[in-house]
């Protein structure tokens, strides 16, 4: 098996098992509000005087927030580019949802690395392979 075949196989395996949806699988609908999104890919920009800017991938400013966790929540929620998302009103609920989602992503990364090391004991590209898998699946981990 080649690394390219490994990557392709892992993508298919993850898709078949179902990728958990953020935020739906990580929050309850009680105590949430709606935020409209631009329908474009989003990234977190630099912190500037305590504010965290969310940018579209073409570099346009979308939103500025005081909370880095809330910025991550919005970017993670935008994976499939919905027009509207639900976000908890409570900052602690946002932190919990983001933390649980990041743990889920970390578990996926660990699983990919372990599988890679079993198949390619001498290989040193487990991180590159995991990055490629996440890129194809449109998963981001801040």
Image (spheres, rainbow, N blue to C red):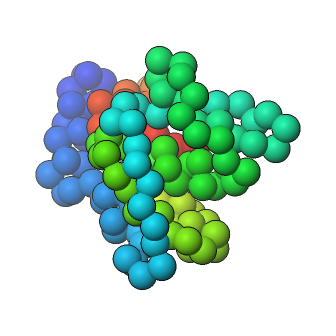
Q: Nearer the viewer, residue 85 or 101?
A: 85
Q: In this view, does 43 lie above or below 65?
A: above
Residue ID at (49%, 50%): 74
Q: Which residue is drawn at 21% across and 31% down?
A: 8
Of residues 15 and 125, which is closer to you in this image? 15
Q: Where is residue 2 in the image (x, y as percent from the top left)?
A: 25, 22
Q: Quadrant of the C terminus?
A: top right
Name the spot of residue 106 as percent of width and height, x first.
Answer: 50, 53
Residue positioned most to the right: 49
Measured as percent of width and height from the top left, residue 53 is found at 65, 36
| Residue 101 in the figure: left or right of residue 95 | left
Seen from the viewer's position, the closer of residues 96 and 102 is 96
Q: Is residue 10 left or right of residue 142?
A: left
Q: Is residue 36 visible?
A: yes
- Identify the image quadrant of residue 37: top left
Residue at x 40%, y 49% (from the top left corner): 36
The residue drawn where x is 79% and y is 34% is 48
Quarter containing the N terminus: top left
Q: Kindly tell me whether residue 126 is visible in this rendering.
A: no
Residue 22 location, quadrant: bottom left
| Numbered disc total | 0
The residue positioned farthest toward the top in the image shown: 58
């Amino acid at each position: 098996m080649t690394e390219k075949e490994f990557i392709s196989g892992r993508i298919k395996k993850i898709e078949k098992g179902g990728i958990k949806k953020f935020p739906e699988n990580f929050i309850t609908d009680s105590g949430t509000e709606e935020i409209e999104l631009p329908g474009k890919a989003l990234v977190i920009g630099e912190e500037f005087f305590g504010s965290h800017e969310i940018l579209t991938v073409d570099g346009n400013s979308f939103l500025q927030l005081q909370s880095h966790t809330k910025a991550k929540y919005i970017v993670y929620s935008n994976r499939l580019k919905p027009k509207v998302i639900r976000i908890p009103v409570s900052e602690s609920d946002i932190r919990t949802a983001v933390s649980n989602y990041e743990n889920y992503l970390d578990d996926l990364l660990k699983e990919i690395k372990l599988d890679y090391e079993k198949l390619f004991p001498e290989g040193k590209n487990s991180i590159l392979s995991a990055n490629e898998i996440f890129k194809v699946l449109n998963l981001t981990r801040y």
